[in-house]
Image: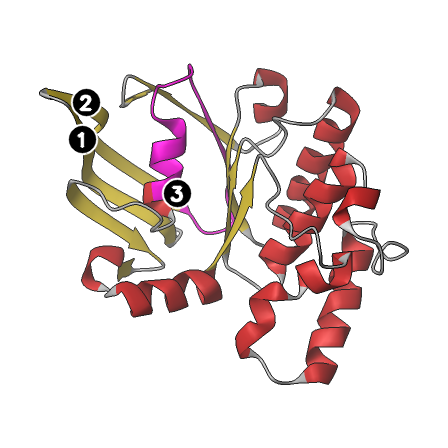
Amino acid sequence: MLKQPAIHLTGVSKTYKRGQETITALSEIDLRINKGEFVAITGPSGGGKSTLLQVMGGLDAPTSGIVQVNDVDLGSLNDAELSRFRNQQLGFVFQFFYLQPFLTVGQNIVLPAMFNTQASAITERLHELATLVGLQDRIDHRPGELSGGQMQRCSIARALFNKPSTLLADEPTGNLDSKNAERVVDLFRSINKVMGVTIVMVSHDSSLASKADRIISIKDGTLND
């Protein structure tokens, strides 16, 4: 049986203007990522990895082509619909964590619940995720009191709060030492296998990328088979 696609890109291109010059970040990308896959995107710096991930997540719009996530054409959504879709369907993890320094770990994790008024459900989900990422004893701490690995695991818990079907991670180990980088990717592997979350991870580290089910290489905006 053919698996359903989580992400389906058809003829996707992205160009930028730099003065009189046109920069091609993505060129006619055709790509299908199935539900439940763990995919790593690799390639040289400036090759289009992050742009591809941002287009997949609706954080950037393609110049041309179609981006479908869970069979929804992102180009057909207005700004409010797209924001709601991202909040409900997608989780994002970035290299620089983007935790709010004045909030506790627990408050950072529950930020995606700003539209959810069920306090008991929020508390239950918080403790479930804090335990999953090994931060159950750090809920009342602030980000400045955490290690880099702990901060990234906090951001992963936050990304998972609304039970997204797909997690998009842009160089999530870029600011971590090798031990913590390995722990983060192993956590992704567990989330993928146990929770069934589709994961797309951009990484420059080939040893970490090898833990994924499939590796996609991109160079000069073009996929390399």
Q: Secondary structure at mark 2?
A: strand
**For the residue carrying disc 1, how many other residues have a C-alpha within 10 Å: few (<14), some (14-19), or many (20+)?**
some
Evaluate if marks 1 and 3 touch, with contact meaning CB atoms under 8 Å apart: no
Dot 1 or dot 2, earlier in sequence? 1
Q: Position of residue 5 (x, y in %)?
A: 36, 51
Residue ID at (83%, 52%) = 135
**Kind of residue at disc 3:** Ile
**Bounds of the magenta span?**
34-54
Q: Residue furthest top?
A: 44
- From the image, tell me which residue sits under label 2: 23
Q: Earlier in the sequence, mark 1 or mark 3?
A: 1
- In this view, the residue farthest toward the left is 20
Q: Residue at x 50, y 59 (%)?
A: 165
Mark 2 residue type: Ile
What x and y, as percent, mark residue 73? 24, 58
Crowdedness of circle 2 by 10 Å Cα count: few (<14), some, many (20+)? Answer: few
Disc 3 to disc 2, C-alpha distance: 26 Å
Q: Residue lying farthest right?
A: 137
Location of residue 120 with respect to 15 vertically, above or below: below
* 176 or 129, nearer to the observer: 176
